[in-house]
């Protein structure tokens, strides 16, 4: 029981991180980026190529992934979202589905369905907490996410540009009327939101440990989406807390699934149930103000 | 005559196939408070949004301090010296008072960071309520306090032209008077202002020059003192009401007679006696 | 009775059923079995794409888990035909039922809300189905999947691909007919209004969440049917058949590239994307087809949200416009704008589909008692009360921000009052949804035109009659004789209204091409077309020339004196208000500052003061 919770929390930090990326873009442009997860997958392929084919050290390969992801977000905002101007949120959201399709099909085309190897950041033996073995990569992941969270919080609270990002979510027109270049704010949210997806993908991949295949992040993205929804879609702390909640629920459902073997995929049922429950009972989320 | 701060020449604008402004022309001079008046739907709000850059001009020319800004984005116009007090105030509700002011100074802090602190202190002096509540979330303040914040936020960019869109909407008359008094003081300090206001009596008392719009055109304009009351009243759709007892106070502002101060009319729950 | 339409349908059905089997048997060398299999997949995907189009294209709701609905259909029919040994004639309808049922359960919580929630929950549904439910041994026979025999009866199987294609095409034709019945009935109009603007749809009296749910359930049923066809075509399915990337995503591409809302375009796109990559010339596509599809999708949504069908239509339009360059353009019509001519408002007979309204004692049609509405900290309406006697024009004036429009919303139902009573025809209605209030006889206009801007003038007039379209959704899907009769009646009333307004020349013009003044007239026409008891007009004269405003006064008086309607009017144009109103309420700071007969209000300087900013001790 306690073991499932600990493991759930560890995984939950990664969902939280991915959810923060989703919410960041949603706050900046009122668009749900359905390609978020796949951008993470795509960037893992970059890591794989850099390390296995070009023998680059891990840090270089990982940096390549994060830069690729950020670049995809930046270009998509520049070339697609911005040009759609007054289009409805529905059409912009469909455009993100287009990006998702593009990335998946590129992956299939180049590598096929077979998984490609992704290097692990650290080797060695980790500690045992509450009877659970925590691998060094999981340890590292928790530390990195907490550091990233702190950095993002400080940036958003204490810099002019960070405040402008927060203000954009509240009133985008007023932001322009203050002389703040709105286009730079949205470019930032898309770039950062997508780069964060690459970080999440890099951190989760050693734990899953099968390398990267097309739509590798698909299910994780759904978990993160559920986390963002639990947090209310517009709240960054809410999204992170939502990630932890989803992580723990998944951990517990995984344990339940090992008992009830007749039903495979307990985790997927749990996520679906969480989304259903949020929509039924608290559509504004735990910390969100408006849906 | 003092220098032109703003010149709007033959501007047309609208939405889709719906033309709202049919060639609007007017000027705002250094140090004055100018006002655009008109009935709802006359295009007065759009005429301001075209100056702010939120609504693009289809044709015509907008000049700010001698520079053509017609094609510039709203944010670039702020950098050139326009500041906005938007309709409904539009303060950032989930940010604190000080964070709101800091965003108002976004362009200033990029030009000259050293000016920020003293300017912020001077705002707290002018609006003591903001100083007292600098860490309060703007969304939790009253309408009047939000109005002060919106004005202070706009002034934080040290603008050469302050655009004020419908400042009186939703505010109690007493609060509007205080707000207008503050605006008058700020104007005396040398800030040029352009005002859009549907509250005509209040508005005419504040501005020095009035531009009256009807269906997307300026139909009548001039210094307030020189305007013909009847024509003003007619254009603003209040003709029959204001005509009988209209008086002129010594500033030249149009004014309805003020006899009793308390409305003797039956209160809300009363039965119509028809 | 054989109408031309029915003859055509029967002809097409006959061809679909006879051509493939016959061709295969006559020329097996030219058209081998694999050819018919390929066409079979194309037909099945066309059915699935039509299902998604109904949801996305018509109603504007996104599903990212359509694969799950197809899968449910396939597994349902598979179990029925293999485990229970029943015919496909049982399995395939059951599949449609199952698909619709799951859509109902999933859509119920998601579609009450406005926004992208359906996309989120369907995405999650897709993963749950593929990774869990479809792998359960009790449901689908474990990871091996389920056999899907093409059983007709007993041991009679439809194993020939050409024969199966014939069956699939006939089913596809059926779906096509149902789909076309959706678009030519009130269902399609309601979906279009919802896609355009949910608030507008509500004001038309459309129960938005119910219609969104209806679109999803219908889409789910067709998807279930398509899934069953797909499964039997492949002889067996497993959980992996229905993955996100193999079905849900390609369907989105087909629908968007084919043109959201275009039946023909979507079906053509489905055939194109299924057949094109298989051309022998393109033997080495290596997945380029999907990459190209994804690019096309992004290009289409960014540049031509109506898809290729719209691009073709636009090009045709441009050519036509060039041809008659000098012809009169709508929106530049000078009658209303310059001369101020406002057409006489239509006097229409009471629609037959209208429920009897209670005749209550007492002169007041509408009573508002102490209504309060707050947004956040702002008390927009703060204890307002008013009465509207039958057969009068009552004015509601006050400065911007006084709460007039919010009070209108509280009466028409777009906002729910925090407290207070709204009584209409003697019944309390403050807890009713907007569409229910419209049914009771409240019609209204909006400050910024509450019509569907991308629909034509005539479609708007038809939409406005939603509440009197007295047939149920099932009758709409079958387009029964009753539906046809009611639709003909609605159309006649719409055309009568157009004729009365002298707007026939704009009948097929999208509303957004009209000038503001013209749109306003159409809006008032729409408000009148259902014979409402109370007509609430929010600043009808805004943006009109002084001449037009004077004419408007005439028309408003006609409303009262000739058409016998009751009017509640928000208006800033004071001469107009004084001209037409029998009684006036002055609103400020959310409550009634003064009220009285027009003559009385006009005499009170305090009222003028409050309205125009003269200080009044509050």
Image (tube, helix red, strand yellow):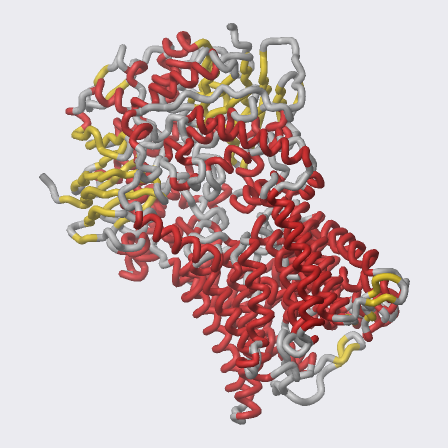
Q: Is residue C544 among the parts visible in the rendering?
A: yes
Q: Which of A146 and A93 is in front in this view?
A: A93
The total number of labels drawn is: 0
The quarter of the picture where the N terminus of chain C appears is top right
| Res C242 quadrant in image | bottom right
Percent of width and height locating residue B54: 34, 48
In this image, B28 relative to A115: left or right?
Answer: left
Of residues C295 and C234, the one nearer the viewer is C234
Q: Relative to A88, is A162 above or below?
A: below
Where residue C567 appears, x then y in whole percent?
Answer: 50, 18
Position of residue C480 measured from the top left corner of the image (x, y, whole percent): 69, 38
Point 24% across, 45% down: residue: B161
Q: Can residue A13 be seen in this view?
A: no
- Please provide percent x and percent y for residue A116: 63, 86
Q: Is residue C257 above or below residue B185?
A: below
Q: In this view, does B7 lie above or below A50?
A: above
Q: Residue at x 17, y 29 (%)?
A: B223
Q: In which quarter of the image is residue C85?
A: bottom right
Vertical order, C445 against C298 (above or below): above
Q: Residue at x 52, y 45 (%)?
A: C196
What is the residue that sits farthest to the left in this orientation?
A: B1
């Amino acid at each position: 029981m306690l073991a499932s919770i600990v493991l759930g929390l560890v995984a939950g930090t990664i969902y939280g991180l991915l959810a923060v990326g989703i919410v960041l873009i949603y706050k900046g442009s009122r668009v749900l980026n359905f390609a978020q997860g796949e951008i993470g997958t795509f960037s893992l392929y970059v890591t794989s190529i850099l390390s296995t084919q070009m023998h680059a050290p891990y840090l270089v390969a990982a940096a390549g992934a994060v830069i690729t992801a950020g670049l995809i977000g930046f270009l998509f905002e520049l070339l697609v979202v911005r040009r759609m101007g007054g289009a409805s949120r529905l059409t912009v959201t469909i455009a993100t589905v287009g990006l998702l399709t593009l990335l998946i099909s590129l992956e299939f085309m180049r590598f096929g369905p077979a998984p490609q190897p992704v290097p692990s950041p650290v080797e060695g033996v980790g500690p045992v907490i509450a009877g659970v073995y925590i691998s060094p990569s999981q340890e590292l992941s928790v530390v990195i996410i907490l550091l990233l969270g702190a950095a993002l919080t400080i940036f958003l609270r204490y810099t002019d540009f960070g405040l402008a990002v927060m203000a954009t979510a509240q009133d985008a027109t007023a932001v322009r009327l203050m002389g703040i270049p709105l286009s730079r704010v949205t470019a930032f949210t898309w770039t950062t939101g997508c780069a964060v997806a690459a970080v999440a993908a890099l951190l989760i991949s050693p734990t899953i440990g099968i390398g990267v295949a097309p739509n590798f992040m698909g299910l994780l993205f759904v978990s993160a989406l559920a986390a963002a929804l639990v947090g209310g879609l517009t709240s960054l702390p809410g999204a992170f807390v939502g990630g932890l909640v989803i992580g723990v629920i998944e951990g517990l459902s995984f344990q339940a699934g090992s008992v009830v073997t007749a039903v495979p995929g307990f985790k997927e049922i749990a996520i679906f149930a969480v989304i259903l429950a949020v929509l039924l009972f608290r559509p504004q989320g735990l910390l969100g103000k408006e849906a | 005559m003092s220098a032109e701060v703003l010149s709007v020449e033959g501007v047309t604008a609208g939405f889709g196939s719906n033309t709202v402004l049919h060639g609007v022309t007017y000027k705002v001079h250094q140090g004055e408070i100018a006002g655009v008046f008109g009935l709802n739907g006359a295009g007065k709000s759009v005429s301001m949004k075209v100056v702010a850059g939120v609504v693009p001009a289809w044709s015509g020319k907008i000049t700010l301090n001698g520079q053509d800004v017609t094609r510039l984005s709203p944010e670039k116009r702020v950098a050139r010296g326009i500041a906005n007090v938007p309709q409904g105030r539009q303060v950032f509700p989930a940010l604190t008072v000080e964070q709101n002011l800091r965003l108002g100074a976004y362009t200033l802090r990029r030009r000259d960071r050293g000016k920020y602190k003293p300017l912020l202190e001077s705002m707290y002096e002018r609006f003591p309520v903001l100083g007292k509540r600098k860490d309060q979330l703007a969304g939790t303040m009253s309408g009047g306090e939000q109005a002060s914040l919106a004005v202070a936020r706009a002034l934080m960019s040290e603008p050469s032209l302050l655009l004020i869109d419908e400042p009186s909407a939703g505010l109690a008359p007493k609060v509007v008077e205080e707000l207008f008094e503050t605006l008058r003081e700020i104007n005396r300090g040398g800030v040029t202002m352009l005002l859009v206001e549907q509250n005509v009596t209040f508005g005419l008392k504040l501005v020095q020059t009035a531009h009256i719009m009807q269906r997307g055109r300026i139909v009548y304009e001039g210094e307030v003192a020189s305007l013909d009351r009847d024509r003003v009243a007619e254009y603003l759709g209040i003709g029959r009401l204001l005509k009988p007892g209209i008086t002129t106070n010594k500033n030249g502002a149009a004014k309805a007679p003020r006899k009793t101060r308390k409305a003797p009319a039956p209160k809300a729950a009363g039965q119509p006696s028809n | 009775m054989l109408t031309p339409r029915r003859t055509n349908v029967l002809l097409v059905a006959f061809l679909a059923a006879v051509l493939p089997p016959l061709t295969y048997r006559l020329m097996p060398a030219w058209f081998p079995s694999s050819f018919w299999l390929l066409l079979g997949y194309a037909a099945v995907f066309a059915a699935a794409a039509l299902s998604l189009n109904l949801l996305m294209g018509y109603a504007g709701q996104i599903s990212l888990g359509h694969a799950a609905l197809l899968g449910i259909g396939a597994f349902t029919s598979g179990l029925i035909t293999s485990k229970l040994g029943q015919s496909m004639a049982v399995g395939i309808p059951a599949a449609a039922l199952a698909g619709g049922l799951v859509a109902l359960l999933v859509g119920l919580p998601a579609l009450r809300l406005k926004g992208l929630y359906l996309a989120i929950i369907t995405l999650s549904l897709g993963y749950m189905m593929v990774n869990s439910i479809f792998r359960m041994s009790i449901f689908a026979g474990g990871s091996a999947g389920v056999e899907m025999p093409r059983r007709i009866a007993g041991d009679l199987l439809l194993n020939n691909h050409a024969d199966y294609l014939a069956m699939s095409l006939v089913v596809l034709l059926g779906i096509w007919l149902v789909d076309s019945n959706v678009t030519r009935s009130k269902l399609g109009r309601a979906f279009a209004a919802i896609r355009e603007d949910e608030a507008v749809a509500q004001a038309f009296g459309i129960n938005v969440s119910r219609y969104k749910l209806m679109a999803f359930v219908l889409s789910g049923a067709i998807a279930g049917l398509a899934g069953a066809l797909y499964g039997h075509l492949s002889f067996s399915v497993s959980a992996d058949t229905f993955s996100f990337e193999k079905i849900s995503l390609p369907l989105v591409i087909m629908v968007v590239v084919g043109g959201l809302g275009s039946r023909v375009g979507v079906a053509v796109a489905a055939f194109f994307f299924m057949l094109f990559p298989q051309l022998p010339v393109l033997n080495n596509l290596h997945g380029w087809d999907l990459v190209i599809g994804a690019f096309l999708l992004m290009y289409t949504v960014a540049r031509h949200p109506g898809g290729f069908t719209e691009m073709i239509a636009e090009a045709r339009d441009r050519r036509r416009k060039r041809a008659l360059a000098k012809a009169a353009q709508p929106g530049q019509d000078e009658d209303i704008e310059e001369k101020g001519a406002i057409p006489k408002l239509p006097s229409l007979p009471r629609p037959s589909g209208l429920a009897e309204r209670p005749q209550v004692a007492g002169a007041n049609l509408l009573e508002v008692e102490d209504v309060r509405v707050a947004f956040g900290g702002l008390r927009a309406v703060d204890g307002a009360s008013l009465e509207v006697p039958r057969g009068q024009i009552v004015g509601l004036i006050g400065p911007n921000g006084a709460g007039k429009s919010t009070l209108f919303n509280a009466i028409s139902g777009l906002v729910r009052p925090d407290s207070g009573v709204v009584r209409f025809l003697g019944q309390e209605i403050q807890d009713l949804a907007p569409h229910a209030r419209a049914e009771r006889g409240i019609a209204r206009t909006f400050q910024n035109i509450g019509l569907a801007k991308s629909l034509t003038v005539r479609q708007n007039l038809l939409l406005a009659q939603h509440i009197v379209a007295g047939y149920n959704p099932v009758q709409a899907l079958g387009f029964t004789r009753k539906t046809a009769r009611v639709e003909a009646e609605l159309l006649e009333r719409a055309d009568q209204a157009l004729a009365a307004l002298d707007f026939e020349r704009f009948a097929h013009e999208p509303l957004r091409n009209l000038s503001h003044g013209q749109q306003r007239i159409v809006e008032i026409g729409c408000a009148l077309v259902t014979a409402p008891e109370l007509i609430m007009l929010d600043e009808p004269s805004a943006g009109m020339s002084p001449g037009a405003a004077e004419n408007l006064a005439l028309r408003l008086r006609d409303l009262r004196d000739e058409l016998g309607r009751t009017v509640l009017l928000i208006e800033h144009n004071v001469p107009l208000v004084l001209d037409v109103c029998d009684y006036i309420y002055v609103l400020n700071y959310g409550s009634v500052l003064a009220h009285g007969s027009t003559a009385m209000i006009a005499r009170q300087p305090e009222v003028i003061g409050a309205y125009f900013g003269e200080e009044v001790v509050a």
